[in-house]
């Protein structure tokens, strides 16, 4: 499975820890930056990663900034993206099961590396429940087509 990953300077340290622990035999990762801790404009990076998920070149995406808020806002501006900011394993599971989220946002200064790894693992290994949730996700997609 191919993943898009991106961060700004506030998420750089966490991104590097995630990259070191994502099993290479399970995931091919496309890194959209940033590549050091120098200040960058997070929208440029978030949009690139989200577009890769939206166009299907990556199955899922992970975006990281200081809080996760800015990156999630940007990712959700891209048509076809359902990005969830998660601070717990439970949130990661539920956003996959009920919202069919295709991107995960994390805060480099709001979750520690061990918790982030657990969140990412649960997000990537949880399937969408479908059923009544499918109708709700379709309503989101239908609305998105009209804006």
Image (cartoon, rainbow, N blue to C red):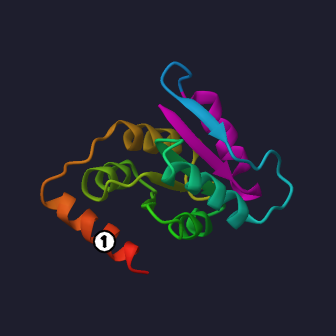
Name the residue at the left extreme.
Answer: 131
- For image coordinates 82% across by 51% down, the residue present is 37
**Percent x, y of residue 134:** 20, 58
Q: Is the residue 130 above or below the residue 122 in the image?
A: below
Residue 49, above or below 41: above
Q: Closer to the camera, 34 or 111?
A: 34
Residue that protrudes farthest toward the right in the picture: 38
Magenta range is 1-22
Seen at 64% across and 29% down, the residue is 20
* Residue found at the very far front of the displayed protein: 146
How many marks overall?
1
Q: Considering the numbered disc 1 on the image, is that residue within a helix, a strand or a loop?
A: helix
Horizontal and vertical percent position of residue 105: 52, 56
Q: Is residue 16 magenta?
A: yes
Which image quarter: residue 101? bottom left
x, y percent for residue 49: 61, 52
The answer to whether residue 3 is left or right of residue 119 is: right
Residue 123, position as x, y percentages in the image: 39, 44
Mark 1 Cα-neighbour bin, 10 Å: few <14, some 14–19, many ≥20: few
In percent of the image, x 55 and y 63: which residue is there? 75
Q: Which residue is mark 1?
A: 142
Residue at screen point 41% across, 39% down:
124
When the figure is inspected, residue 31 is found, relative to residue 140, above or below; the finding is above
On the rendered structure, is 4 left or right of 91?
Answer: right
Q: Is residue 137 left or right of residue 130?
A: right
Where, quadrant-wise, is the C terminus in this rendering?
A: bottom left
Q: Is residue 52 magenta?
A: no
């Amino acid at each position: 499975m191919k993943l898009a990953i991106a961060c700004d300077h506030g998420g750089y340290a966490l991104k590097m820890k995630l990259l070191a622990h994502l099993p290479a035999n399970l995931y091919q990762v496309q890194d959209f930056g940033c590549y050091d801790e120098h200040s960058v404009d997070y929208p440029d990076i978030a949009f690139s990663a989200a577009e890769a998920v939206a166009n299907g070149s990556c199955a899922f995406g992970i975006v990281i900034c200081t809080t996760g808020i800015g990156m999630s806002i940007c990712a959700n501006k891209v048509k076809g993206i359902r990005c969830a900011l998660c601070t717990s394993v439970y949130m990661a599971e539920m956003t996959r099961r009920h919202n069919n989220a295709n991107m995960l946002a994390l805060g480099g200064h709001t979750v520690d590396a061990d918790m982030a790894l657990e969140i990412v693992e649960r997000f990537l290994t949880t399937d969408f429940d479908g059923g009544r949730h499918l109708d709700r996700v379709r309503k989101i997609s239908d609305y998105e087509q009209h804006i």
